[in-house]
Amino acid sequence: MNDDRVTGDSRPTRSQTYFDDVIVRALLPAAKAVLSLILLCPLMVSCSGVQSVLDPAGREAAGVATLFFAMLIGGAVIWVGVVVLLFYAARKKNAHSEQGAGRLILWGGAVMPCIVLGALLSYAMWLMPNVRPFFSGGGEGLQQIDVTGEQYWWRVRYLDPDGSIAFETANEIRMPVGERVAFQLTSPDVIHSFWIPVLGGKMDMIPGRRNVLTLEGDKPGSYRGVCAEFCGTSHALMGFTVEVMEKPAYDAWLASRRSASGGGDAEGLALFLKHGCSACHAISGTEARGVIGPDLTAFGERGSVGAGTLGNSTADIARFLRDPAVIKPGVRMPHYNMVPEAETDRIAQYLKGLR
């Protein structure tokens, strides 16, 4: 007897076997995906930290994290719905009519996904003002910080209310907790992208254009920012630190930076000037007034050398001075291997002592 005509309970029909094969092939990848997610759950603890979008420390970042989880849940709803319909269609013993199959496709493959995606889109549009607040006039009335993306470091200028430069630093940003800050973003060379994941979304820094990004930190702490647009050889070595501070501590820091001076160590300063470092770098209260490279005033209080490339110990500073291109390819700073080691170490000691 032909297998196609066997309909008894003792032996499955060929169509039933075909549907079994279909369901196995369809559900096996889904089962693997679910198992992978279960096994990866312990790794979710790594979603926190100084550079995690899922561990927000600001209002904008909280909106981004909320939108991510909403999209994740919406996608899961669509996926589960389609898998359930597939399972139902494959396991149903009686053949579906053309009309019934059409209803399954219409409701399960079109109506349900459109409802879920429409709800997600509406929610995202409602959430958008929190993710990227708009302030007319470029954030007037807020603390203004001018940030310039260079190859491969960050020039940071704190501005007075009248728009004049109060002081300049590099590769670090400090801001008061609970207060919105307006970042004026630009670049003199190539396109960079300014991003502090725990505080908010990214924004491009485009040569010849000034973009304004406002951020507010609601948790004191030390966080990490990065360049999110490939900008050259050392793009990955272009980090910066962000300190969100209590208001009294922030005001005290501002006052100390306005009066900072690097003239306390006469011997170290003399070596710094002797070897031409002042041609590119500035130190408040000294003859060093270079504008090409980072301002080194209060350099000793920074957390790193070379925009997050090395620590800020005396040994790290001396190592960077001797051959910066080895540590940070493409950097425009010349090497100082010709300088006697003792003098390089003394300059490093001087820079480390700047507060």
Image: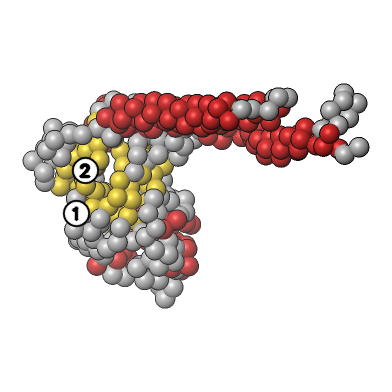
What's the amino acid at mark 2?
Val
Res 237 label: none
Determine which quarter of the picture holds residue 351: bottom left
Instruction: From the top left corner, tell me how far across and down residue 26 is, in percent.
Output: 67, 37
Q: In the visual, does 14 lie left or right of 213?
A: right
Residue type (three-letter) at the residue carrying disc 1? Arg
Residue 212 is tagged as: 2
With 82 as the anchor, is 234 left or right in this view?
left
Whether residue 164 is visible here, answered yes or no, is yes
Q: Residue at x 45, y 56 (%)?
A: 236
Instruction: Report helix, strand or loop for mark 2.
Output: strand
Can residue 269 be seen? Answer: no
CA gap, disc 2 and disc 1: 10 Å
The residue positioned 27% from the left and 63% from the top of the image is 189
* Residue 56: % across, % down: 41, 30
Q: Are marks 2 and 1 in contact (CB under 8 Å)?
A: no
Give the total of numbered labels.
2
Residue underneath mark 1: 209
Would you identify the image quadrant in which residue 116 lies? top left
Is residue 277 or residue 14 the one in the foreground?
A: 14
Crowd around label 1: few <14 · some 14–19 · many ≥20 (10 Å)? few
